Image (cartoon, rainbow, N blue to C red):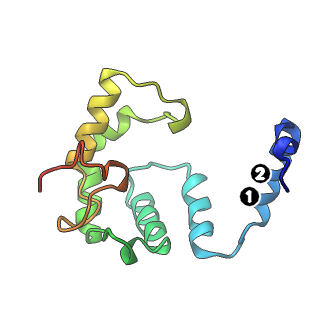
């Protein structure tokens, strides 16, 4: 299909996304867990949620790529130690973010302080250009 103008129709786009959400690899562990994370309504700093995120990242093969997840205890402690910073981002959506000093400072602090991956591996692919790469 060379003509993508069909996707300019908002109703068709919405229907396509709805079908994809219901039918795309419904029993794939990573996709299943992602849906659980996305629809979680409890405390995002609870053991239950942090464990769900950790297992989801594992299902996405996080430990078979360039990064390696920290041990769960380090992962959990790191999130809990950064709870105040994480709460500053509560309700934010990545596609709606506007850059401001408070947000940028919070993201930098999280980048330098979270220990979600082991110290001998790259921290985050997002910052792999080295501009904000932490010195470990």
Say left or right for 57 vs 35.
left
Which percent across, then down, holds residue 21? 74, 58
State which quadrant residue 37 falls in.
Answer: bottom right
Which percent across, then down, holds residue 71? 26, 72
Which residue is at 56% across, 70% downward? 30
- The residue wearing badge 2 is 17
Say left or right for 89 vs 132.
right
Image height check: is 123 above or below 13? below
**Residue sitting at the far top:** 100
Which residue is at 26% across, 46% downward? 111
Which percent across, then down, holds residue 127? 32, 48
Which residue is at 39% across, 55% downward? 46
Say left or right for 64 vs 77.
right
The front one of 16 and 128 is: 128
Few, some or many C-alpha atoms within 10 Å of disc 1 (few <14, some 14-19, many ≥20)? few
Q: Secondary structure at mark 1?
A: helix
Q: Which mark is residue 21?
A: 1
């Amino acid at each position: 299909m060379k003509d993508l103008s069909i996707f300019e129709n908002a109703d068709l786009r919405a229907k396509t996304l709805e079908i994809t959400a219901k039918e795309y690899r419904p029993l794939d562990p990573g996709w299943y867990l992602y849906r659980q994370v996305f629809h979680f309504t409890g405390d995002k700093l609870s053991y239950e949620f942090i464990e769900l995120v950790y297992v989801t990242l594992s299902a996405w093969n996080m430990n078979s790529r360039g990064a390696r997840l920290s041990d769960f205890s380090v992962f959990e402690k790191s999130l809990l130690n950064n709870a105040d910073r994480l709460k500053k981002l509560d309700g934010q959506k990545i596609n709606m973010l506007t850059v401001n000093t408070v947000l940028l400072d919070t993201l930098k602090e999280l980048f330098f302080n979270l220990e979600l991956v082991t110290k001998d591996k790259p921290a985050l692919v997002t910052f792999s250009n080295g501009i904000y790469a932490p010195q470990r």
